[in-house]
Amino acid sequence: MTLRDELTLTKHWIVQHHPHEAGDPLLRVENVSLWYDGHPALQDVSFELQAGEHLAVVGPNGAGKSTLMKIIAGVLKPTRGDVHVYGHAPGGHICIAYVPQRNAVDWNFPVTVKDVVMMGRVGKIGFFRSPRRTDWQRVRQALETVGIQALAERPIYALSGGQQQRMFLARALAQEAELILMDEPLSGLDLPAQEELLALLPTLQQNNIALLFALHDLNLARQHFSKILLLNRQLIAIGEPDEVLKPSNLRRAYGGHLHIVSDEGRWLGLSDTCCSEGEG
Ligand code: ADP
Ligand code: MG
């Protein structure tokens, strides 16, 4: 998706702003299936997410993680099943911020970091109005929260991978998102940059912002998330890390591509060979 596409999406958000239904969970995914050209990418996936809850989405390449994110973002329509955000269809819900896989973004688009973060405000400002001082204040605050205020004037192509991800997080904060979808934000980042990004997650939780975070590294998922969804087209398990990442589940998800070792009675999965840079 290019930033131009995203602007179009943002425009769509304003038109379809829905009020929240009291009593509904933040997100309800109900029996969602999706076929691409006759091939199933997701089959009968159901789960709920409460306000402020953080969920790691793990599974092998091709498991349907990106497909699931896009359906929740309202970018793709499921073949069957429903997604409800506070009881409404997701397309155009302003409280969702979707951060696509890095290679799905057109990084040559001539725009600065602060402008991308300001795009998060469009839903609040209105598409044809100019940002006010308070909007720029929000943008500045968001950049400070993620630690890249010094990069505000920089063109986005001049950012490192970790800085790009933090910029998108800043945009989600500027948007006042209640649910952030991050699709493999760690892929292609070196370890310090991964840790820097992961270190921001508690701040989101303190602000009651829910998060769906797709990643490959099962050990990082275990360390940074108290709830994990294991996916391989079907939902294999969801819940606490030790329960979800047990050998029987990992075998169902990864087949022979995963080495399972035991560490002090806890099961560690040594990731498969994936991490292809291909966008799904
Ligand atoms: P993941 O993000 O877990 O790697 P994806 O959601 O990208 O998985 O893909 C799930 C399956 O759907 C894969 O088999 C992939 O090849 C297929 N797929 C993804 N996008 C498309 C598309 N636009 N057209 C056809 N098949 C697709
Ligand atoms: Mg993917």
Image: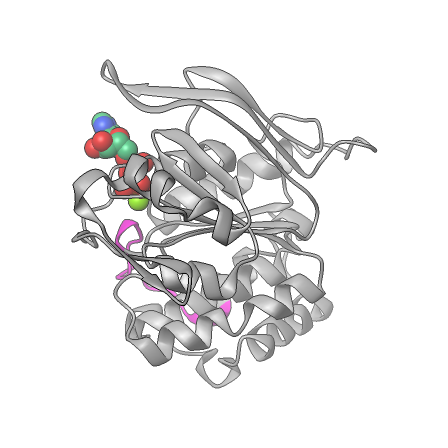
In the image, is residue 95 above or below residue 197? Answer: above
- Counting the numbered discs, the total is 0
Query: Depth check: 233 or 268 in front?
Result: 268
- Quarter of the picture containing the N terminus is top left
- Quarter of the picture containing the C terminus is top left
Quarter of image, ligand 1:
top left
In magenta stretch: residue 110: yes
Considering the whole magenta stretch, tell me its main secondary structure. loop
Give the farthest residue toward the right.
22
In magenta stretch: residue 12: no
**Is residue 185 in view from this perspective?**
no
Residue 79 at what x, y percent from top left? 41, 15
Query: Depth check: 161 or 106 in front?
Result: 161
The residue under the point 62% across, 62% down is 174
Residue 165 at what x, y percent from top left? 41, 65
The residue under the point 26% across, 61% down is 108
Residue 180 at what x, y percent from top left? 55, 51
Which region is colored magenta?
103-114
In the image, is residue 103 above or below residue 112? Answer: above
Query: Depth check: 193 or 248 in front?
Result: 248
Give the farthest residue toward the bottom.
150
Question: Is 8 displayed left or right of 17 in the figure?
Answer: left
The residue under the point 43% across, 31% down is 235
The residue under the point 49% across, 53% down is 242
In the image, is residue 129 above or below residue 82? Answer: below
Give the farthest residue toward the front.
265
**Is residue 211 in view from this perspective?**
yes
Q: Quadrant of residue 146?
A: bottom right
Q: Quadrant of residue 171?
A: bottom right
